[in-house]
Image (cartoon, coloured by chain):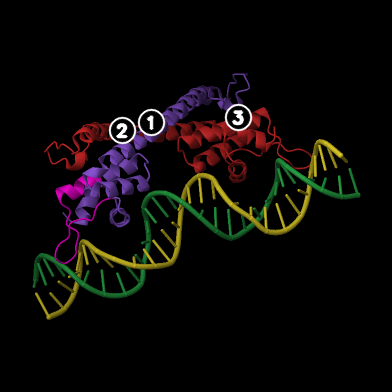
Chain colours: A red, B purple, C green, D yellow
Amino acid sequence: MTIKEVCEKYDITQDTLRYYERVGMIPAVTRTAGGIRDYQESDLGWVQLAICMRSAGLPVEAMIEYVKLYQEGDSTIPARLQLLTDQREILLDKRKKIDETLNRLNYKIARYEIAAQTGTLTWTGDGDHDGCSGK
Amino acid sequence: MTIKEVCEKYDITQDTLRYYERVGMIPAVTRTAGGIRDYQESDLGWVQLAICMRSAGLPVEAMIEYVKLYQEGDSTIPARLQLLTDQREILLDKRKKIDETLNRLNYKIARYEIAAQTGTLTWTGDGDHDGCSGK
DNA sequence: ACTTGACCTGGAGCATACTCCATGGTCTAT
DNA sequence: ATAGACCATGGAGTATGCTCCAGGTCAAGT
């Protein structure tokens, strides 16, 4: 599979894909004799993983480390497990923050929907400036 | 309340707080006669909101726009409602991506926990290179 | 063999969001 | 009224994660 096809498949740019490989976020991709990338299934697996991790906002650095450990063989399994659980923690935190912000947004949106009718914002009067207090 | 106290209260640096004000992510903070920031409750409300939105990863740009609209008065209520719902959409998407990545991480972690015992990774044999396929 | 389009590399450039000075003013206690 | 702590501003610098060339190579069709 050419880089162009992979990019279309995953909706990502060629530059990004080459960048991922260059920094070591994915292992070196299979090449033709002429030096042109020819993605195999296993290469695609890494591409998918990289895209998935990045889409959740995990640092490029973490993936680089993971790939590095992977290439060092089975002795790094405990280290990889540690890395994965660390990243999971980070994502759980992140999701918590998002949920908090969603609560706040929902509260504000509810007030704004009323305000859009009346033309003026109603106040809770609890010092909640513009509905910003969250809670 | 001085900038120092606010920073300690919200665990943020003075530079960041001044930056937020400078770019317009929060409205101009109350000052003493000498020009020193003296945060009032209403100022704190905005600080809280800014920190909350940023902690969820919403762009600084969006907050700047929101504050700008807020300062233009009630006529911008519909625009503000729109902005808030747009940002909510973004957060919902983001949470979805995180959940997908968490699923994938959980799957990998489960396999690694077994691998940490046996010393080798077990394979699903479905072309799921290193458990990367997600699904 | 030649054209043409896709691909290659290395390196510079860019957007976002801070972060870090240097220089100078404010304030409080002695 | 002077030290010492804290604060202000403007601007430069940094980290992250791409993104965009320039100049050259590779490969498929004619």
Tag 3: amino acid: Gly
* Residue A126 higher or lower than B108, as above or below: below
Q: Give B83 or B135, whichever is nearer the viewer.
A: B83
Magenta residues span B26-48
Q: Which residue is denoted by mark 1 in the rendering?
A: B92
- Quarter-of-image position of residue A85: top left
The x and y percentages for residue B65 are 32, 47
Local secondary structure at mark 2: helix
Whether the magenta-drawn stretch holds residue B35 is answered as yes
Q: Give A123 or A27, whichever is nearer the viewer.
A: A123
**Sequence-wise first label, 3 or 2:** 3
The x and y percentages for residue A65 are 53, 40
Mark-to-mark CA distance, 2 and 1: 8 Å
Q: What main secondary structure does the magenta stretch of the protein show? A: loop
Instruction: Tell me, yes or no, if residue B93 can be seen here.
Output: yes
Chain of the residue under the numbered disc 2 shown in the image: A
**Which residue is found at the position 36% from the left and 41% from the top?**
B58
C20 left or right of C2? left
**Which residue is found at the position 30% from the left and 50% from the top?**
B25
Tag 2: amino acid: Leu
Instruction: Tell me, yes or no, if residue A135 can be seen here.
Output: no
Q: Is the residue under label 2 in contact with that under label 3 (CB below 8 Å)?
A: no
B33 left or right of A77? left
Q: Which residue is denoted by mark 2 in the rendering?
A: A102
Local secondary structure at mark 3: helix
B31 left or right of A69? left
Image quadrant holding the C terminus of chain A, namely top left
**Which residue is found at the position 20% from the left and 41% from the top?**
A130
Q: Is the residue under label 1 in contact with that under label 2 (CB below 8 Å)?
A: yes
Mark-to-mark CA distance, 3 and 2: 33 Å
